[in-house]
Image: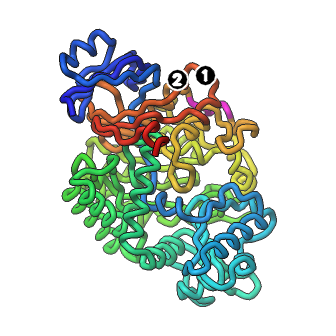
Amino acid sequence: MPARTLYTHATVFTADGAEAEAFVVEGDRFRYVGDEAGARRAAGPGAAEVDLAGGFVLPGVIDAHTHLLMTGQSLQKVALRDAADLTEIQARLRRAAEEDPHAPRILGAGWLYSALGSAAPTRQLLDEAVPDRPVYLDANDLHSVWVNSAALAELGVQDTTPDPIGGRISRDPVTGAADGMLHETAAQQIVWPALAQAATDADRDAQLESAFEHYLAVGVTGAVDMAVQDDDLAAFRRAVQRHGGSLPLRVKGHWLVHRRGSDAQNLAQVARAAQLAEELSGQWLRICGIKIVVDGVIDSCTAAMKEPYTDGSTCEPIWDRASLTPVVVAADAAGLQVALHAIGDEASEIALDALGQAHRVNGPRDRRHRIEHLETVTEDSVRRLAALGVVASVQPVHADPAIQDNWRAVLGDHRVERAYPWTEFLAAGATLAISTDAPTAPHQPLPNLYVATTRRSALDPSLPANLPGYALDLADALCHATRDAAFSCRAEHQEGRVVAGHLADFTVLDADPFAAEAAQLLTNRARLTAVGGRIAFDASAAAVA
């Protein structure tokens, strides 16, 4: 392979404010970015040359909040996100069971509460479709799992099984029997470990490779995995060995800290994350912080809100201030980044209180802490977030109007008029990082950017926009998905921009998104994806294969 490669005849979005039409890659880095004449001089004699034929180049997208192994797993599950109603959900499950009669269990993902209409998700409804073996269906938000009677039996969940801290085993309001829904930590601490034990390392390796392949094919070169646990970490380590010390894309991980019964148990998890951060700090695999799920989600009314839901219910956070603050302060003192899932307006306030205490106790430093999702947030919390230098980590695809019916219905008041207020964070001076949170949503970045810049639906573009006043400018959105995503994981000095000296992570799109209507983002495709100067995906080769 030549030491240098010259790329010409392109429109280059550098995410650095500069214009360019050509660039030179030397080894794993950009040597030159600018005009073609300068690129040819920098390339020198003997360089390989690639004519990009008018392609649009942008920095490799960094999915700033995703779940890689889960994404690979979800690609193998019965897809339910577009199931129109309960009848369709049941039909897909029956079909899956018939097509694989020896499968020990049926796994599905992505179902929406709105598809059920007025029906409640119960084990009996799944028993009607598949009565003879366990069924596990991840809700679209991954915060609940809907199971049938056989799955409850396999899990050992009985009517008298106590709820874990921060979670709920849903029960029939009349009989008190477990009804087939497991929410929040009941899913994380009961279902997830059971399914992990049922899978093999070979299964996980194949699932992780599938996630890598799917991401590279859409122009993603880096990912921040937001719930790393033992199985994920072991799979990442094996992947590094398989790939000769590297990975198909760059992975940063946040170690998931579960709320336990005592501060000592919680802090022990922080100590484990700090040890892993020291051990894993390379260019390809790095543990950079911890992840804490402060509350649940709005669709299942488990997000911590300041005011009740439309049915009059309220929900306590998974982590209250007393339990959360010592963990955040300890992680901050250890130099770890803290990523706090906070969807409800009360949860974001709790998160900011804990982060503020870390500032007071540990003094000034470059922290780069983050709050994830921020679907509902008070104006005061927006200002506090910016003042504390907290990254607003958002997932535009969660605001897709096609999945908002139930979300809006369970709030039903003034809160839906300030939903997903991305431009408010920018106006306050905060850094915005864009991600998908796959597999809670599709992993493709361009449809995600379509939602970000139009507030319209990537799933059903005919739907009206969802609060279009909060839509992002396209150039800004591209920067939030590249440059600012790199900033969110302390990688901005090497990743996220097409500039000389940075790692040569880039993608080439078929068309210039600035030269067409926004809807073109739904059909635009990655032609090439390069990671560290190496072509990791080539659409023309994939088409031949």
Quarter of the image that includes the N terminus: top left
Which residue is rendered at x = 53% and y = 56% of the image? Answer: 439
Which residue is rendered at x = 57% and y = 46% of the image? Answer: 377
Question: Residue type at mark 2?
Answer: Asp
> Magenta includes 470?
yes
Instruction: Label 2: state its secondary structure.
Output: loop
> Magenta includes 90?
no
Residue 483 at least partly seen: no
Q: Where is residue 69 in the image (x, y as percent from the top left)?
A: 43, 61
Would you name the residue on which mark 1 appears? 516
Of residue 373 and residue 153, the one placed in the foreground of this image is 153
Mark number, residue 10: none
Q: Are marks 2 and 1 in contact (CB under 8 Å)?
A: yes
167 with respect to 239 (left or right)? right
Q: Quadrant of residue 116?
A: bottom right
Question: Residue type at mark 1?
Answer: Ala
Which contiguous range is marked in magenta? 468-472
Of residue 503 and residue 404, the one placed in the foreground of this image is 503
Q: How crowded is mark 2: few (under 14 residues within 10 Å), some or many (20 or more)?
A: some
Q: Where is residue 359 in the image (x, y as percent from the top left)?
A: 32, 48
283 with respect to 257 (left or right)? left
Q: Position of residue 41 (x, y in %)?
A: 22, 12
Mark number, residue 512: 2
Which residue is rendered at x = 27% and y = 52% of the image? Answer: 286
Q: Where is residue 308 in the image (x, y as percent from the top left)?
A: 69, 59
Secondary structure mainly formed by the magenta segment? helix
Residue farthest top in this picture: 37
Instruction: Label 1: state its secondary structure.
Output: loop
Q: Is residue 122 above or below residue 416?
A: below
Q: Distance between the residues labelled 2 and 1?
A: 7 Å
